[in-house]
Image (cartoon, helix red, strand yellow):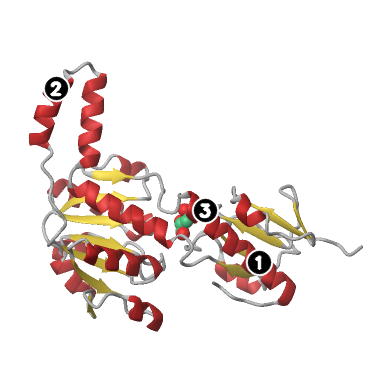
Amino acid sequence: MSKKTTVKTLNAISEKGLSLLTEDYQLDEQADNPEGIVLRSYNMHDMTFPSNLKAIARAGAGVNNIPLDRATEEGIVVFNTPGANANAVKELVLTSLMASSRQIFDGIMWVKTLADQGADVPKLVEQGKKQFVGKEISGKTLGVIGLGAIGARVANDAVELGMDVIGYDPFISIDMAWNLSRAVQRVLDIQEVFEKADYITMHIPLTDDTKEMFNKDTFKVMKDNVYILNFSRGELVHDDDMKQALEDGVVGKYITDFPNAKTLTMKHAIPIPHLGASSEESEENCAIMAVRQLMDYLETGNIKNS
Ligand code: MLT
């Protein structure tokens, strides 16, 4: 009987994906020396790679939790699942855009807190509707930085919601460019997005070039009271500068899927506990794609990141 290939998961991975492992594989959470690893957000930077490890499959888009240089040096292939969670993230971005613009998050927190303290609910309702007057997004300008699987979907649907959309992406693929609505105005200079947008959403990876690209210098050129949405990575934003910009009213709201101790307490920050990809459908899609890629590579040497 030939030896089975050992696969280990470092995070909870949807059964829909794991059940695809054929009888040639054994899933062993305790394995010290697996050939394949499937993970979601587990931080592998401090981990020594097992000597048998051949491939890592990340059930998600970002790969900054994996030391790519070290993996390359050691001949370990890293996969991600671009696009598999794009619809889930897009839906949450647009939900958050509309909800924050209409002050829904602040209104809910306010009414629950005061009602819990015994305030008269009909009076709260009377007061609330005057206190939380929001803005409609239709007719406003949305700046989308990064027009990949998620950014392009956000841009296209925002057009349908009546927004004027400006998109910036120096690396847009031909496929993505074809799929982008003609109504999305593509600009070659990111400054144009910063200057014109009422709302800015970022859909870019964290790299040395993009780290803290949202900082006091970039806030300076933005419209007063701009809303910034970060469903990409927390480190794209300089936290102290953001705190100051929120206090000064330069940034009206910071909606982030990456709260940390600093951003949680910021005035007008809306911290979301990294729910962008957390839908049943997206967890299944990512797990299925990750497991298929892993098996394909381990069996045939095929490197297909889709
Ligand atoms: C991603 O990079 O796609 C997300 O961080 C996914 C996740 O939440 O696991």
Answer few, some or many: residues within 10 Å of disc 2's Cα (few below 14, many 20 plus, some between 14 and 19). Answer: few
Instruction: Choose top left, top right, bottom left or bottom right for residue 129.
Output: top left
Q: Distance between the residues labelled 3 and 1?
A: 16 Å
Instruction: Tell me whether the residue at label 2 lies in contact with that at label 1, contact meaning CB atoms closer than 8 angstroms.
Output: no
- State the residue position of label 1: 294
Quadrant position of the C terminus in the picture: bottom right
Q: Residue 122 carries which label?
A: 2
Hey, which quadrant is residue 267 in on the image?
top left
Q: Do the residues labelled 3 and 1 touch (CB within 8 Å)?
A: no
- Considering only order in the chain, which callout, 1 or 2, is on the residue closer to the N terminus? 2
Could you say whether the residue bearing mark 1 is in a helix, strand or loop?
Answer: helix
Label 3 near label 2: C-beta < 8 Å?
Answer: no
Q: Is mark 1 within 8 Å of ligand 1?
A: no
Give the distance between the C-alpha atoms of the residues marked 2 and 3, in whole angstroms: 41 Å
Q: Is residue 304 or residue 48 the one in the foreground?
A: 304
Nearer mark to the viewer, of 2 and 1: 2
The amino acid at mark 3 is Glu
Picture residue at 79% right of the left edge, 59% below the top: 23
Which type of secondary structure does the marked residue at label 2 adopt? Answer: helix
Residue drawn at 88 percent across, 65 percent down: 2
**On the rendered structure, is 248 left or right of 105?**
left
Going by the numbered disc 1, the residue's amino acid type is Leu
Say if residue 116 shows up in the picture.
Answer: yes
Mark 3 residue crowding within 10 angstroms, few (<14) / some (14–19) / many (20+):
many
Is 158 located above or below residue 278 in the figure?
A: below
Residue placed furthest toward the left: 130
Amino acid carrying mark 2 in the image: Pro
Q: Which residue does the numbered mark 3 point to in the structure image?
A: 283
Whichever of labels 2 and 3 marks the residue nearer the N terminus, that label is 2
Q: Front-most of 67 and 293?
A: 293
- Total marks in image: 3
